[in-house]
Image (spheres, rainbow, N blue to C red):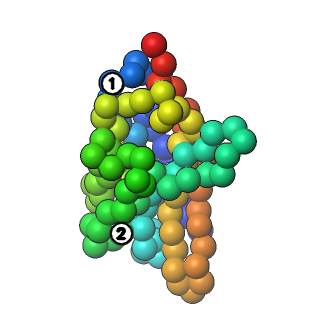
């Protein structure tokens, strides 16, 4: 079992910045990658960014050049969001991808990010 706790989020004006942090606990040795997904009403949850244990990042097309993800240590991943746009608004969920003994996704409770003037 893996538990995920998110922090950060809130209300920010367009063009502003926010930083989200995800802390994992439990069976952390089983985690292959930590990442962030976001969801808005009526749409599927979409990848924002993820990063593997080896530090290899993957960014969603809509956030490239504005967001960065970093692996602070084996248990923590931070998402730095710059030049935020109203379309970045949504609930952001931390994700832990486990590959063994079988592929499984763990999810945090989610944190609201609202970009509005």
- For numbered disc 2, what is the local secondary structure? strand
- Whether 7 is drawn above or below 44: the answer is above
Q: CA distance from mark 2 to mark 1?
A: 28 Å
**Nearest the camera: 60 or 103?**
60
Look at 61% across and 52% down and name the residue there: 45
Look at 33% across and 49% down and name the residue there: 64
* Residue 96: mark in rendering: none
Q: Is residue 44 left or right of residue 70?
A: right
- Residue 105: x percent and y percent? 59, 67
Sequence-first disc among 2 and 1: 1
In the displayed orientation, state which residue is furthest to the right.
Answer: 42
- Residue 106: x percent and y percent? 59, 62
Write down the residue under mark 1.
15
Q: Is residue 72 left or right of residue 27?
A: left
- Whether 74 is drawn above or below 76: the answer is below
- Residue 48: x percent and y percent? 45, 51
In the displayed orientation, state which residue is furthest to the top.
Answer: 117
Is residue 10 visible to us here?
Answer: no
**Nearest the camera: 95 or 87?**
87
Look at 37% across and 56% down and name the residue there: 59
Write down the residue under mark 2.
52
């Amino acid at each position: 079992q893996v538990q995920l706790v998110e922090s950060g989020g809130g209300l920010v004006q367009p063009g502003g910045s926010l930083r989200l942090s995800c802390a994992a606990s439990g069976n952390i040795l089983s985690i292959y990658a930590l990442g962030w997904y976001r969801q808005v009403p009526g749409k599927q949850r979409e990848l924002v960014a993820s990063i593997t244990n080896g530090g290899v990042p993957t960014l969603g097309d809509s956030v490239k050049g504005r967001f960065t993800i970093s692996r602070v240590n084996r248990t923590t991943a931070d998402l730095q969001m710059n030049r935020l746009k109203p379309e970045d608004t949504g609930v952001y969920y931390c994700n832990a991808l486990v590959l063994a003994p079988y592929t499984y996704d763990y999810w945090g409770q989610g944190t609201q990010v609202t970009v509005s003037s």
